Image (cartoon, rainbow, N blue to C red):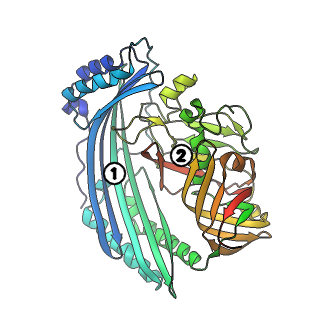
């Protein structure tokens, strides 16, 4: 039995008079250069099974609005969980603080679109609560049956629906219904007292039905166990400056952090990015082309429209090694004299939009991936990453590897543990010596933080050969 979906979110039919709301919005932005009324309803659920027991089962629901008025570099923002004319009237006074004496000319509205990148259905309604619990228990039992060394299994399901309505001062009402679903499996194996873990997961903007299919989750279990087995045989990582081959797909998170944030418009307008002022110049090796693409159907980072109402775009950031574009929201685009790129994103109605990534990836090259790894004389082959961090001002990054191997004289050797990759984005881009023909996107697990706001994102890349990265390890 599936649970019934709630009625669609239609705030101008049930909470606000559209004409009155438009009049208040226009009052808020009179003399400003931009602004909008952003209304949102969000519902989500998450279930976590750990070591055979349900440790967490949650359901969250929220709704509210955010009202913004923008003039120059200043934005006035007010938000409320109460969607009513009274609350909106109070918000107008706060938003107008940014307008001051006025004199601004309203920016052109975003172009319209009839494109839909994902189904407007509620993933939570794909199965009843009991069926979801049963699936998690089946995952636990199946994992333990695959290897007697499995001592712990953690499996989780999450699903949600974000419904967005945007009212622009020009009058049109824009809507976007955004589903999201995800499944993760983690196992811990014990061999003679040594314990190692492995995990696998993924999802996207679609329903839960495909994730609940045994054909799907058995593959996740197999991958998680494979990684744990690899780590049981891992030896301490070497340390020093060496060649690094990166696997396809999720290792693109290094590109996201080390390069992507530095190509967001606000950091470059304020000249705090390591890439500020380099438009039109070579910043990467020949052959390196990087895009931010929010138009990929059903992907975790994709958006039909961004949180300002601009249709998402496939924005080329680096083309054949040359810096050609930044990711822009409306405010930064206007201040920099360029067009918005559909990258204005916010965590919720309680947050102001800013330039953010969607799905950021490097295009494939021509090289055979195996041949690239065979070129490594003394280095590592990293195919899985955990956490990482970057300093936007200089592009310096540190990433921990969750699955990596020693490579000597072109041969892949023992797995290693405790490896970290240390470098800076600008240098790493220049050090790329080979680009594989095997572009892959991540399985749908990415989240990105910026200024305290978190949004779902995607990453991707082909196999890469990079020279001269610092590997931090524990072996001499």
Of residues 104 and 180, the one nearer the viewer is: 104
The image position of residue 292, as x and y in percent, is: 57, 41
> Which picture quadrant has residue 96?
top left
**Would residue 280 appear left or right of 80 to someone viewing this image?**
right
Q: Residue at image x 36%, y 58%?
A: 158
Q: Residue at image x 20%, y 26%?
A: 85
> Which picture quadrant has residue 33?
top left
The image position of residue 310, as x and y in percent, is: 46, 30
Residue 322 image label: none
> Which picture quadrant has residue 476?
bottom right
The image position of residue 472, as x and y in percent, is: 66, 64
Above-or-below relation of 331 to 230: above
Q: Residue at image x 33%, y 73%?
A: 137
Of residues 184 and 260, the one nearer the viewer is: 260
Quadrant containing the N terminus is bottom left
Tag 1 residue:
160
Tag 2 residue:
359
Of residues 222 and 105, the one nearer the viewer is: 105
Residue 299 visible to the viewer: no
- How would you rate the neighbour count of disc 1 (Cα within 10 Å): few for under 14, some for 14-19, many for 20 or more? many
Of residues 394 and 189, the one nearer the viewer is: 394
Q: Helix or strand or loop: what does disc 2 sit on? A: strand
Residue 372 visible to the viewer: yes
Chain-order first, disc 1 or disc 2: 1
Q: Helix or strand or loop: what does disc 1 sit on? A: strand
**Would residue 367 appear left or right of 12 to someone viewing this image?**
right
| Residue sitting farthest toward the bottom | 192
CA separation, marks 1 and 2? 19 Å
- How would you rate the neighbour count of disc 2 (Cα within 10 Å): few for under 14, some for 14-19, many for 20 or more? many
The image position of residue 185, as x and y in percent, is: 43, 68
Above-or-below relation of 212 to 124: below
């Amino acid at each position: 039995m599936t649970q019934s979906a709630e009625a669609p979110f239609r705030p101008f039919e049930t909470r606000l008079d559209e004409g009155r709301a438009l009049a208040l919005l226009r009052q808020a932005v009179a003399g400003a250069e931009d602004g909008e009324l952003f209304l949102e309803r969000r519902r989500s659920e998450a279930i976590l099974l750990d070591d055979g027991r349900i440790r967490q089962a949650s359901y969250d629901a929220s709704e509210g609005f955010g009202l913004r008025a923008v003039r120059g570099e200043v934005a006035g923002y007010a938000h409320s969980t109460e969607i009513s004319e009274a609350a909106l009237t109070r918000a107008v006074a706060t938003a107008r603080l940014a307008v001051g004496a006025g004199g601004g000319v309203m920016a052109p509205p975003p172009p319209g679109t009839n494109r839909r990148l994902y189904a407007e259905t509620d993933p939570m309604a794909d199965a009843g609560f009991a069926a979801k619990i049963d699936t998690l228990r089946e995952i636990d039992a199946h994992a333990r049956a695959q290897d007697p060394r499995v001592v712990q299994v953690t499996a989780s399901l999450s699903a949600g629906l974000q419904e967005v309505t945007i009212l622009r001062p020009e009058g049109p009402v824009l809507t976007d219904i955004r589903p999201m679903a995800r499944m993760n499996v983690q196992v811990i194996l014990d061999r003679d007292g040594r314990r190692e873990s492995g995990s696998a997961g993924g999802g996207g903007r679609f329903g839960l039905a495909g994730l609940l299919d045994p054909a799907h989750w058995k593959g996740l279990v197999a991958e998680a166990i494979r990684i744990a087995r690899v780590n049981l045989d891992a030896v301490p990582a070497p340390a020093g400056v060496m060649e690094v081959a990166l696997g396809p797909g999720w290792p693109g998170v290094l590109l996201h952090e080390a390069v992507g944030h530095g190509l967001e418009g606000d950091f470059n307008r304020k000249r705090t990015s390591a890439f500020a002022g380099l438009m039109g110049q070579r910043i990467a090796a020949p052959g390196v082309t990087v895009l931010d693409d929010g138009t990929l159907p059903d992907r975790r980072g994709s958006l039909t429209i961004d949180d300002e109402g601009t249709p998402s775009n496939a924005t080329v950031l680096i083309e054949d090694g040359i810096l050609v574009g930044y990711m822009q929201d409306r405010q930064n685009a206007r201040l920099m004299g360029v067009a918005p790129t559909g990258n204005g994103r916010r965590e919720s109605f309680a947050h102001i939009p800013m330039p953010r990534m969607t799905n950021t990836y490097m295009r494939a090259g021509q090289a055979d991936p195996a041949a690239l790894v065979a070129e490594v004389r003394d280095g590592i082959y990293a195919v899985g990453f955990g956490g990482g961090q970057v300093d936007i001002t200089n592009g310096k990054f540190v990433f921990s590897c969750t699955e990596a191997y020693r490579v000597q004289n072109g041969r892949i050797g023992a797995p290693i543990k405790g490896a970290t990759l240390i470098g800076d984005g600008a240098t790493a881009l220049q050090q790329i010596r080979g680009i594989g023909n095997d572009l892959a996107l991540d399985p749908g697990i990415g989240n990105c933080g910026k200024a305290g706001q978190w949004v779902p994102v995607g990453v991707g890349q082909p196999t890469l050969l990079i020279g001269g990265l610092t590997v931090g390890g524990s072996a001499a």
